[in-house]
Image (cartoon, rainbow, N blue to C red):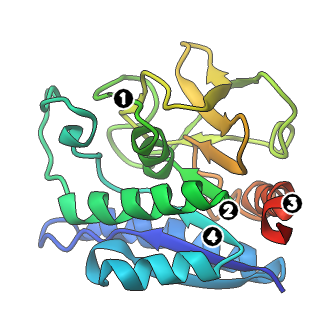
Amino acid sequence: MPSAALFHIRDTRPNASRYQALLDDLNGGAVTALRDAGWTVALHPAAERPLETLLDAARRADVVVILGGEDVDPRAYGSSDLRPHATPYDPAADEAQLAVVRDTVAAGRPLLGICRGMQLVNVALGGTLHQDIAGHRRPEGDPFVATDVRFDRPDPVSTSGDLLCSHHQSVDRLGEGLDATARAADGTIEAVRHRDLPVWAYQWHLEHPRSASRQLSPVMASLLAAGAPERVA
């Protein structure tokens, strides 16, 4: 039975209960879909555990997953805050998740980034982010937007139905070793893969409860298979 370590963040601000409920719903979608597909799954709150505990959990897993959440602090990629509407950053979570990404990449182990997770993968490998873009989330009500995506190579989710986005940041300069593998109609990078390593990332929410069984589960199986030579070695 393959194992997955899912690293997430929690927003504990008193006025953030609705946003945290959204994250809990997405994280629950990931856990349910993977367990139904035969995975052993553990969720790890990135800012609430010692770094060595997080790294040990990542090293024990067959696939590491970095989930969604708040904006990445631009200081992590050498920029200042250029957003028109400021929201708090979580530097402790950024540092922990970036460390997990870099450790996993250095070891050549399978890694998946989703939404914020894709942005962190890009930043960890030296890339940068667009700090504010329009058209990829709804400002009120259901925040998810069904996005038309053009794939540049075969992908397990290319025919799986709606690709549900909810983001206002995106990849700008690609990190070292990463290729853009899918783009929205406006050119926004919606998926990346590492040229040499089993490192994949998606900007849309393939862990959404409406999509997870059709998108997250097949991606995890394909990523596990892609990382098999590294694990055997």
On screen, residue 4 versus residue 27, left or right, reads right
Count of numbered badges drawn on the protein: 4
- Between residue 106 and residue 84, name the one nearer to us: 106
In three-dimensional space, the C-alpha distance between marks 2 and 4, rounded to whole angstroms, equals 20 Å
Query: Is label 2 in a helix, a strand or a loop?
Result: loop
Quarter of the rendering occupied by the C terminus: bottom right
The kind of residue tagged 1 is: Thr
The kind of residue tagged 3 is: Pro
The percent position of residue 9, horizontal first and vertical second, equals 35, 68
Packing grade of label 4 (10 A; few <14, some 14-19, many >=20) is: many
Q: Which residue is mark 3?
A: 229
Query: Is label 3 in a helix, a strand or a loop?
Result: helix
Query: Is label 4 in a helix, a strand or a loop?
Result: helix
On screen, residue 51 versus residue 89, left or right, reads right
In three-dimensional space, the C-alpha distance between marks 3 and 4, rounded to whole angstroms, equals 25 Å
In three-dimensional space, the C-alpha distance between marks 3 and 1, rounded to whole angstroms, equals 30 Å
Labels 3, 4: front one: 3
Q: Which residue is mark 4?
A: 30
On screen, residue 102 versus residue 222, left or right, reads left
The kind of residue tagged 4 is: Ala
Packing grade of label 3 (10 A; few <14, some 14-19, many >=20) is: few
The kind of residue tagged 2 is: Arg
Packing grade of label 1 (10 A; few <14, some 14-19, many >=20) is: many
Q: Which residue is mark 1?
A: 128
Labels 1, 2: front one: 2
Q: Disc 3 or 2, which lies upstream in sequence?
A: 2
Labels 1, 4: front one: 1
Q: Disc 1 or 4, which lies upstream in sequence?
A: 4
- Between residue 83 and residue 166, name the one nearer to us: 83
Q: Which mark is residue 218?
A: none
